[in-house]
Amino acid sequence: MLMSDTPRPFWQTVSLADMSREQWESLCDGCGKCCLHKLRDEDTDAIYFTNVACRLLDLNSCQCSSYATRFRKVPDCVSLTPEVLADIDWLPPSCAYILIRDGQDLPDWHPLRSGSPDSVHEAGISGRGRMISERDAGLLEDHLVEWPAEIPAGVARKRRKRPRRR
Ligand code: SF4
Ligand code: SF4
């Protein structure tokens, strides 16, 4: 039997619920797409992305400019946890948490694979260069876009989970 000495990376061996804080945080690829405003159709529950970013998002780095204190400034910012992930239907299909939740692997452009935080931008996966701040945007309805919901090459198309009714 052939055996490899190369240890498997943690995201293939540790469940989301069992990850350390450091492992959990490192799963985020820094795309910034979860910080875009979305609209939900009240009749169909469908989600529509806009290119309008939260006012705290740095549009170039795609990082939160006040990550440690964000909940004081943006009370409706959502903290991702394994429990929250189970029901969520508005994260982009490229999001690493969704990929791992749905049994997929991380793609080559993920910083944990490439070793560089720039690879998510170089691969055209992040929102860099195509977002506008909510400070400048005006009506969300004027900024509907499809690119955040696009499924990147190499990522399997999965049926989206319907959230449980609360
Ligand atoms: S969409 Fe997912 S991978 Fe991208 S920044 Fe948000 S949490 Fe991180
Ligand atoms: S507060 Fe920060 S993490 Fe939360 S949505 Fe805004 S930019 Fe994103």
Image (tube, rainbow, N blue to C red):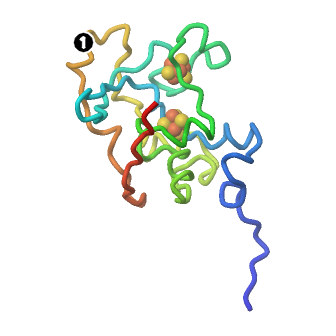
- Quadrant the N terminus occupies: bottom right
Query: As displayed, is residue 20 above or below residue 72?
Result: below
Q: Is residue 67 left or right of residue 138?
A: right
Query: As displayed, is residue 128 above or below residue 7?
Result: above
Where does the image place residue 104, in percent across and percent down from the top left? 52, 59
Q: Is residue 30 visible?
A: no
Query: As displayed, is residue 155 above or below residue 49?
Result: below
**Residue at 73 percent of width and 46 percent of height:** 19
Q: Amino acid at mark 1?
A: Leu
Where does the image place residue 32, in percent across and percent down from the top left? 48, 31
Query: As displayed, is residue 35 above or below residue 136?
Result: below
Q: Nearer the viewer, residue 161 or 156?
A: 161
Q: Is residue 150 left or right of residue 62?
A: left
Where does the image place residue 164, in percent across and percent down from the top left? 45, 39
**Residue at 62 percent of width and 35 percent of height:** 81
Where does the image place residue 144, in percent across and percent down from the top left? 24, 27
Q: Nearer the viewer, residue 120 or 163?
A: 163
Q: Quadrant of residue 29?
A: top right
Which residue ends up furthest to the left in the rendered image?
A: 142
**Residue at 75 percent of width and 38 percent of height:** 22
Q: Is residue 35 visible?
A: yes
Q: Is residue 16 left or right of residue 61?
A: right
How many neighbours does mark 1 have within 10 angstroms: few (below 14), some (14-19), or many (20 or more)? few
| Disc 1 secondary structure class | loop
**Residue at 40 percent of width and 20 percent of height:** 53
Q: Nearer the viewer, residue 79 or 113?
A: 79
Which residue ends up furthest to the bottom in the rendered image?
A: 1
**Residue ID for mark 1:** 139
